[in-house]
Image (cartoon, helix red, strand yellow):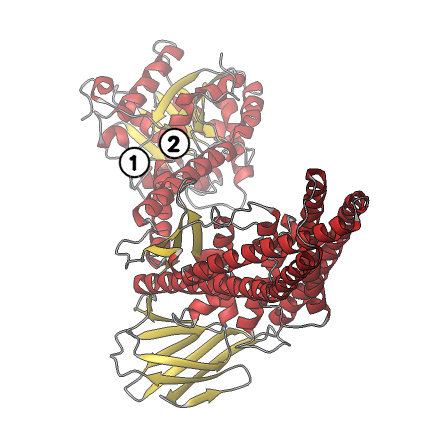
Amino acid sequence: MRSKKDLTPIDGLNIINKYKFLILSFVILGALIAGVNAYYKPYIYEATASIQFNSDSKNLESTDLLTEAILGSRSSDIDTAKEVISSRSLVLEALKKVDLTTHIWGLNRLYKATELYDNTPFIPKVYKGLGLIFYLKPKDNNSFILEVKGKNQNGDKINFRGEFKFNQIIQNDNFKVKIVPTGKEFKYFKYKFSVDSPIITAQNIINNSLSVSRRNKKANILDISFQDTVPVRAKEFVNELTKVYLKRNIEQKTQNATQTLKFINEQLKLLQGNLQKSQKNIEEFKSRENTMDIKLSAQEISKKIEDYDSKLAILNMKIKILKDTIDKIDKGKDLSTLTLVGLGVDSASVNELTKELQQALLDRKALLQDYTYKHPVVRKLTDRIENLKAIIKESILNILKGLNEQKKIFLSQKERYIKELKKLPKAEQNYLTLQREFNFNNKFYTYLLEKKTETEIKKAATANQNKILDYAITPNIPIKPKRKLIVTVGAMAGGVLGVLVAFFLNARDNTIKSEEDLEEIDAPIVASIPKYNSQNSRDLIVLKEPKSPIAESFRLLRTNLQFLISNNQRGVVIAVTSTVAGEGKTTIASNLALSLNMLEKRVIVINFDLRKPTLHKVFNLPNGYGLSGYLSNQVGLDKILKHTDIDNLDIISAGAVPPNPSELINSPKVQELIERLKKYYDYIILDTPPVGLVTDARVLIRSADIILYVVRANYTKKEFVKIIKEVKSQTKRGFYIVLNDIKVDFDSNYSYGYYK
């Protein structure tokens, strides 16, 4: 036998079928909530522009130490470009051309908001109260009602309402605004607007609306996408942001090229004088000493010394520029153009810190156009700049330390070759020294001239290196919300929740469902009465619908009782009881009486439930004189016998509710009444009170030949089984169970033609 705790798939389907209307209501509720949510969600549009990057890394690739010293190691860093495009300073720059700080919504009668952009009937000027939500309801072409609700910066509630004129200054402690009409028609019955600070707007754009991504790993193409509720504004903003980036990029590259040219020109000016002097010294030496032959070994030594001169020259340039950079940091000079291009510094961390410092300086410069140094965001950015300067200075000092160590090594190696050279005759030494100086200056001067030309060409061609591949176009189809999907998901979520609630309610339902729940009583179930759907649950179903399966179930009950009664037995007493009220005792008793009467038997039903009499209502008879009057010796038997419209079927109603029903039922007159009735009736059916509430029924069932204990499915508590077992144990006569109100799905095969 299956354990009561096991839950089979069939049980699960039965639970779902039982609570199907509850589950359906959750599905409808979920779809409704999701539908309302989807209705009020604004459409989001996405515009995308593309930038193509032409890498110049090959042209700037280091080929020797001099190139490294002059130009450093540079390449087009597409990841850096992504960060720059999504930086606050660049977004703030774009916001100057495309206003995303001001939002105006039109509200329909259902308060659905539609954001307006270039067709607004008014422009709000908010001088104070950034971030507050204002509601405007136009009255006519000259006046409106303004409402402000929310909290100010101190957390205090704002509840403001008033009628004002257009172009009028409206102010209090929390805000100061002016509404300027544009002359366009007021199409909505109400409007909502707010104005945020540029810096908050920029941060919201970076965090929520802007995305910059590389199209693929092999292509140097960046896609810049922006999401907005207004498609035209989305297109305009992403295009403006793209233009601002290219402009900033050109300015930065031009600035780097200008600085490089400045450095080269300074070096050329110095080398030009040195070269002229070296050439003059050689000519004077030749004219004085005449031309002389130099041995091959002496030339090689001189070449070595010349190489170390070149290396030392590069180191000295690096050291000079690094020291100048530290000096600029210490003296607090303008660092917006600070760059390590030309240093040949191979420290990735220093290069990244320099870029970060430069970006922070640009961000602060943009913010200072709208705010002072005391603004919290500006102060925070200033602190970061100071920290970056300290870190960069410390990093440069470490680099300087390494360069000085390297310089000592080069000087030591150069000194060793100079000692070798000093072993030569004095004249040869002097000539080689002059020749070495001339070669070095000439080589370096020629190289710088080449680099100057290259840099000037690159500066002129900067504008053509990166270009806009595709401008953004106005999007026509929103990317979200997917309203049908939202409703579908809402309905599915409601269905899942409904099923969970159904299983929860079923788990909490501690009522008897089927015959399995009655197995431990060890008492026969003589009938299972199907559920009867009717406005009046006490109908005489056997008479009203004689061919129904329910009427058939009462015939089956009658047949089973006949097997339990001796042949030709007269005056059989049947007690119908239950644990509590509402389980169907009166319905079972009255329909059983009618079924027995159909066998041409004399049947009487006595209503012993003196506290809540209902039997007379079933047979549509007056209560009047009844059992309570007889037991209290107020009337005789002939006064309380009531004949129904059905031959040989009588009833005794309960009568007036007495003050002492228990005493009356326990009186000897009850047994006397039953004995008298046995002489005239074949069946005497006792409609008793519930045994779980009062003791009256337990007294009555002692006089019964058969006890029918009514248990109502999905109503009787499982805990009542203990009471039923107790009543059975106290009964020595036939004890049987009638399972009432069970749910059965009848079909044509089951009903065998008896029920349509």
Distance from disc 1 to disc 2, alpha carbons, whole Å, reads 20 Å
Q: Is residue 36 visible?
A: no
CA neighbours of label 1 inside 10 A, class few (<14), some (14 to 19), many (20+): few
Find residue 271 and report its horizontal and vertical position in percent: 62, 62
Quadrant in the picture for the C terminus:
top left
Find residue 472 and report its horizontal and vertical position in percent: 31, 57
Quadrant of the image occupied by residue 682:
top left
Q: Residue at label 2?
A: 16
Quadrant of the image occupied by residue 28:
top left
- Amino acid type of the residue tagged 1 in the rendering: Asn
Residue under the point 58% across and 21% down: 730
The vertical placement of 675 against 457, above or below, is: above
Callout 1 touching callout 2 (CB < 8 Å): no
The vertical placement of 79 against 505, above or below, is: below
Compare residues 16 and 520 and report the one nearer the observer. Answer: 16
Specify the label residue 289 is tagged with.
none
Find residue 75 and report its horizontal and vertical position in percent: 51, 49
Which label's residue is closer to the chain start, 1 or 2?
2
Q: Residue at label 1?
A: 533
Quadrant of the image occupied by residue 333:
bottom right
Side (left or right) of 692 relative to 12: right
Q: Is residue 586 visible?
A: yes
Residue under the point 22% across and 17% down: 749
Find residue 750 and report its horizontal and vertical position in percent: 25, 18
Compare residues 624 and 200 and report the one nearer the observer. Answer: 200
SS for callout 2: helix
Compare residues 614 and 738 and report the one nearer the observer. Answer: 738
Side (left or right) of 249 relative to 652: right
Q: Disc count in the image?
A: 2
SS for callout 1: loop
- Amino acid type of the residue tagged 2 in the rendering: Ile
